[in-house]
Amino acid sequence: MSELAALKALSKAKDSEEKRLQERRRNVLVLIMRHLVDHGYVETYERLCTETNLSLQKIDAADNVDLLRVLQEFEESFEIKFGKRPKVVRRLVEEVSGGGGGVRVLRANSGGRPPPAVSGAGVPPGGLPAVGGAAAGAGPSAAAAGVGRPAGGFEGPPMSSAVAAHQRRNAGAALVAASEANRRAELLERRQHAMNSVQAPPEVGMQRIAGVVVDGRGPLMNAAGAAAAAAAAGAAAAGGGGARSAAGASAGGDGSGGGGLQGLHVAGQAAHLAPSRAPPTGGGSDSDSDPEGFFERRVLKPLPASLQGELRDLGAAISRDIFTASPNVRWDDIAGLDQAKRLIKEAVAMPIKYPQLFTGLLTPWKGVLLHGPPGTGKTLLAKAVATECRTTFFNISASSIISKWRGDSEKLVRVLFELARYHAPSTVFLDEIDALMAARGGEGEHEASRRMKTELLIQMDGLAKGNELVFVLAATNLPWELDMALLRRLEKRILVPLPCTAARTAMFTSLLAGRCAPEVGMAWLAERTEGYSGSDVAVVAKEAAMRPLRRLMAQLELDGPVDPNLKVELEPVTAEDARAALEVTKPSARLHEDKYKRFNDEYGQVA
Ligand SMILES: Nc1ncnc2c1ncn2[C@@H]1O[C@H](COP(=O)(O)OP(=O)(O)OP(=O)(O)O)[C@@H](O)[C@H]1O
């Protein structure tokens, strides 16, 4: 195999491994959500939905796969492999230290990872469903169902029969109903204590369990395990029947299998939150907007533990500006701008694909400035990055930073970059950067604004020094107003100019395809729109296309009897329509044409 082919194969393998990992992370979260809902932890489920941007309304565990069963499969395969049952959780030893107050610290009795922070912030706000004796107070059905489980979790009998599934349903309903505040507080404390005293040993993580089961990696995994694995990966749409029956048999002859869970109804609010399972539809997405299923699988990690208090709030606010759904703009949707596309690919897409080529002197570009007249496609380019490059995309409008976080913008910038590094590879798109980074030291400049600018420069310096794949893409209409120090850090300054004739022809073709009479040539339109921006071109095309619609509407609105032969269909756009559209739509972006050219001659850097 040639070196080039080997490099490509390596990059492809890395890509599919990353996809698999993303898919596994999502699957774990979906299984957890299904488990929470089946067991009545409705508020925790809700919170998880908010944190992960997933929901059981969009995606659900496949039939016959649930967390308990996955764990059971893991235990069985582990036992076959190593001759002993795995240690899934371990008890932590409570130590009391510190002076008079006595600080309670939980430690693992044998090494391993630290316990989770025990603070108000770490406690789910809505409380937890009944544990132990509390179930009795939750109502007759809960008591009858015997839902009280010993604190500490997994010690209950495996719920593998249809009866158990039925009981769980009842229990869920009863538990949701039992939500008085005082009882919740008591339960919360008890459960929190229980959870803090048991912890999974470091070698047992959900990802690992799911990995073993989903990948069928356990060499001695039985057939049912592999079948359940296929179902868990959601990839067994075609062979689902076989998988279902095999897994059902292994789980203690639960003939009803997932059928027992069909049509799950949880009382009150839970009903809309916890839809009944849809039939399995197979794995990833095949939607047009996300053909590779990247966004379908896009699950954000929870905020890093280093962000506490108000920084955490800022982190949550910034996380809302992360694209988790595809903006659906492909490179090919953008007419012209080849140079900008090439540079951005070079800075973002290629270093992720071929990291071994981008080292030393060739470390990827860390900052690119797109500047040019309004409506020329700068935002469009950023959206194409979000769609096409597999990075976490932070879509930050500078003016929103200023208006929302006036006093806090310095902290916001720090948190933004911390999150970008945490979610790397990332792209931070700073739109309207001029609003944020006008030259410092101007008259009447606010102290907070100066601090924020300095912070942005510090953070960008940090990027230049570090190895993380974090890339800043900034856009502005007023490049000459930018701070010189920022310009230096945005290594590539690319003019996004008014579109040339060829680009305008391409735009008209894509916008008006199939709508025009033969006499309306796209080149003819392009020739008559010299000086128009991309967005002006879009307005001309829309205006031209509106005219036949207006004629049709006029017909429909005519008083009197409706002509039964009237066809409700649009006529094609005529040459007269096109001419009229051009007449009423003038170019909007010529104002500073010379200034952009001058700025580009002086500062533009194009490889
Ligand atoms: N190169 C292009 N190819 C296709 N469509 C374009 C192009 N440039 C602009 N457009 C059209 O113009 C609209 C506005 O483009 P966009 O928002 O990217 O401009 P912008 O440069 O970011 O403007 P501003 O500086 O005012 O924010 C797009 O939605 C698209 O319809």
Image (cartoon, helix red, strand yellow):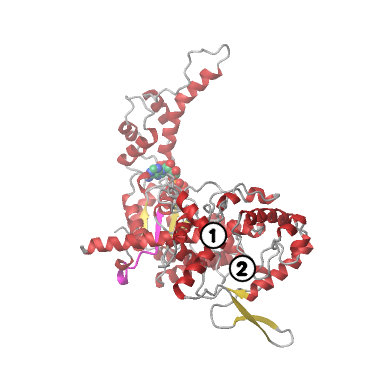
**Residue 260 placement (x, y as % from top left):** 60, 51
Label pair 1/2, CB-CB below 8 angstroms = no
Residue position marked by numbered label 2 in the rendering? 154
* Label of residue 174 in the image: none
C-alpha distance separating marks 1 and 2 = 16 Å
- Looking at the rendered structure, the secondary structure element under dot 2 is loop
Segment colored magenta: 358-371
Report which quarter residue 35 is drawn in.
bottom right
Quarter of the picture holding the N terminus? bottom left
The residue located at (64%, 57%) in the rendering is 164
Res. 93 visible in picture: yes
Which of pointers 1 and 2 indicates the residue nearer the eye?
1
| Picture layout, residue 58 above or below residue 127 | above
Q: Nearer the viewer, residue 512 or 461?
A: 512
Reply yes or no: does residue 363 show up in magenta.
yes
Q: Position of residue 388 (x, y in %)?
A: 39, 53
